Image (tube, rainbow, N blue to C red):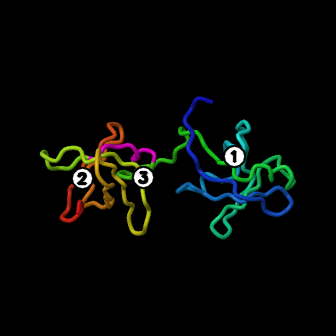
Amino acid sequence: MTEDLLTVGRLVNTHGIRGEVKILSYSDFPDVRFAAGKKLIVIPENGNSTFEVIVESAREHKGMFITKLKGYNDINQVEKYKGSLLKVPSSDLVELPANEYYFHQIIGCEVYTDEPESGLLGTITEILTPGANHVWVVKPAKGQDILIPVIDDVVLDVDVQAKRVTIHLMEGLLS
């Protein structure tokens, strides 16, 4: 399997004795990812080889998805997969609206200011989700990380192909 894989969840526990599992979703589209008939790639925590499963049914329950996988009808069949990551091929991305991006597209982008003399600020290493908007963590060549709020007044242009982001430095952003 040479295609890039995207993590969409983690199999955190079993549910009942009939082979259902609890999945913690890492996806913005869990209803799509865990819909009946969808294929998931299981990456076992213990390092065993990966394999594919098909979702038979899923329902949301207390922030998790209780999921039945085809061919798994007993708790003993699924218990050994607790902690496994669930992935999908990158070709299975859900289309996003204009000016919205996946985290993996943003992380690694170089950040420049709209002031020609300022140049490169650094590289986006992490995305925080504290509340109303995301915050990009930018690692400069030297010094402390810079926190950039992802709002229209700050983020001017995102070019994921060139891995380049242009921002406007509002007063107090670097202090």
Q: Reading the chain from its start, which is encountered first: label 1 or label 2?
A: 1
* Three-letter amino acid code at the position of disc 3: Glu
On the picture, is 134 further left or further right than 29? Answer: left
Is disc 1 in contact with disc 3, using a CB cutoff of under 8 Å?
no
Which secondary structure, mark 3? strand
Q: How many marks?
A: 3
Amino acid carrying mark 2 in the image: Ile
- Which residue bears the numbered disc 1? 45
Q: Secondary structure at mark 2?
A: strand
Q: Which residue is mark 2?
A: 167
Q: CA distance from mark 1 to mark 3?
A: 24 Å
Picture coordinates of residue 72, whole percent (x, y): 83, 49
User: Is residue 105 magenta-colored?
Assistant: yes
| Residue found 38% across the figure and 64% down from its top | 133
Give coordinates of residue 70: x percent, y percent. 79, 48
| Residue tagged 3 | 126
Q: Is residue 165 visible?
A: no
Mark 3 or mark 2, which is nearer the start of the sequence? 3
Q: Is residue 79 magenta?
A: no
What is the C-alpha distance between the residues marked 2 and 3? 17 Å
Tell me the quarter of the image containing the N terminus.
top right
Question: Is 144 left or right of 52, judged from the image as shown?
Answer: left
Span highlighted in magenta in the image:
104-111
Residue type, numbered disc 1: Glu
Asked if residue 111 lies left or right of residue 16, the reply is left
Mark 1 residue element: loop
Q: State which quadrant residue 104 falls in.
A: top left
